[in-house]
Image: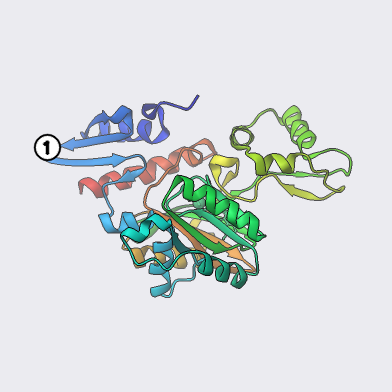
Amino acid sequence: MSTPNTQRVLSRIVRRLCERRGICVADLSEGWILRLTRGETVRHIHGYSFDLNGAATHAIACDKAATSDVLLDAGVARVEHRLFLHPEMARYVRHPGNWAGMLECFERCGRDVVIKDNTGTGGRDVFRARSLVAMEEAVLKLFSRGAAVALCPFVEVEQETRLVLLDGEVMAAYAKERQAVTGDGRRTVLELVAGRVAGEGLTADLGRYLASVDAEAAAVLGEVPRAGETRLLNWRHNLGQGASVRLIGVEMLRPHVGLALAAAKALNLRFGSVDVVSVGGKLMVLEVNSGVMMEALAGVTGGAALAEEVYGRALDAMFG
Ligand SMILES: Nc1ncnc2c1ncn2[C@@H]1O[C@H](COP(=O)(O)OP(=O)(O)O)[C@@H](O)[C@H]1O
Ligand SMILES: [Mg+2]
């Protein structure tokens, strides 16, 4: 069972902060929308998006290929995302057909690509394809659900870091660390995971991983890693799929901060987060979010206070 919207960390923190500031909070749409009023001033929070970014900025951040184009134009290093539209879109836009472009992209990316819903979140519907048939399967699946997919080269991510920023300042940063097990040459990944649960109990992170297991992740569970080999349970870094939060002091991340602020400036983003990946020691922007979700962050030591500080500053910016 998922948590009701009114029980979200965001909702609980914002209520508390608003009470102190004399801001009145009303839940709309079962608590997914918060209407905040003080005197004549009305502001909204929709999901995790605050009334701080312009409509075009929000739309660009929600569109992975658009973000990639805007960052390229501004000279900000990013993982290229190329847009492919469902053929039905030919009624509305010039459409050369997808096959030639996809094949060209697949070859140019060394026959190793990631295909995703262009407006997706949470790592859902993000597929890696290392063969034409795998790419075709992913594309067909995505086009059965939506009108736009993004194709990008698969890059070997050494670390994925999220930087939360407000008005040109990075307020919080954390690494997303994927779940892994160490092989003993005998047990399957599933048995190793069960061993971890028996030892340390079912942590929130492992619980989120188990709840997210799909056919691809299930295939990994049957493998037997060699003794001493580290086996990732999921190649994606999404917290909703089991990755853990490791808070990092902003002062430790100077190059990341420079890149994240450049990305925010390029999109004219006031409040949001930038995901920076390190690939072969080089930093690149993977995605930009104009919503700030801190549900998992609030669960780690020091995270709840940080989430409260970030949301407090965002509220002050909205009512300033
Ligand atoms: N091009 C890529 N190369 C390697 N890993 C990727 C790539 N694109 C996405 N991923 C992995 O998939 C995860 C989800 O992709 P992302 O673009 O962030 O979508 P979402 O908005 O659903 O989180 C990332 O955290 C990363 O681990
Ligand atoms: Mg992501």
Q: Give the quarter of the image for residue 169.
A: bottom left
- Position of residue 235 measured from the top left corner of the image (x, y, whole percent): 64, 51
Q: Give the quarter of the image for residue 244.
A: top right
Q: Is residue 166 left or right of residue 187?
A: left
Q: Visible in this render: residue 63?
A: no
Q: Secondary structure at mark 1?
A: loop
264 up-or-down from 299: above or below = below
Q: Is residue 159 left or right of residue 36?
A: right
149 up-or-down from 23: above or below = below
Q: Alpha-carbon neighbours of circle 1 within 10 Å: few (<14), some, or many (≥20)?
A: few
Count the marks: 1
Q: Residue at x 75, y 31 (%)?
A: 194
Q: Visible in this render: residue 319?
A: yes
- Position of residue 174 measured from the top left corner of the image (x, y, whole percent): 53, 51
In this view, the residue in front, 278 or 68, is 68
Q: Is residue 121 left or right of residue 231?
A: left
- Disc 1, ligand 1: is the CB inside 8 Å? no
Please state which amino acid type lies under the numbered disc 1.
Gly
Q: Residue at x 28, y 54 (%)?
A: 53
**Ligand 1 quadrant in view:** bottom right
Report the residue marked by disc 1. 39
**Which color scheme does this rendered protein use?**
rainbow
Q: Residue at x 31, y 58 (%)?
A: 57
- Position of residue 300 measured from the top left corner of the image (x, y, whole percent): 54, 38
In this view, the residue in front, 8 or 90, is 90
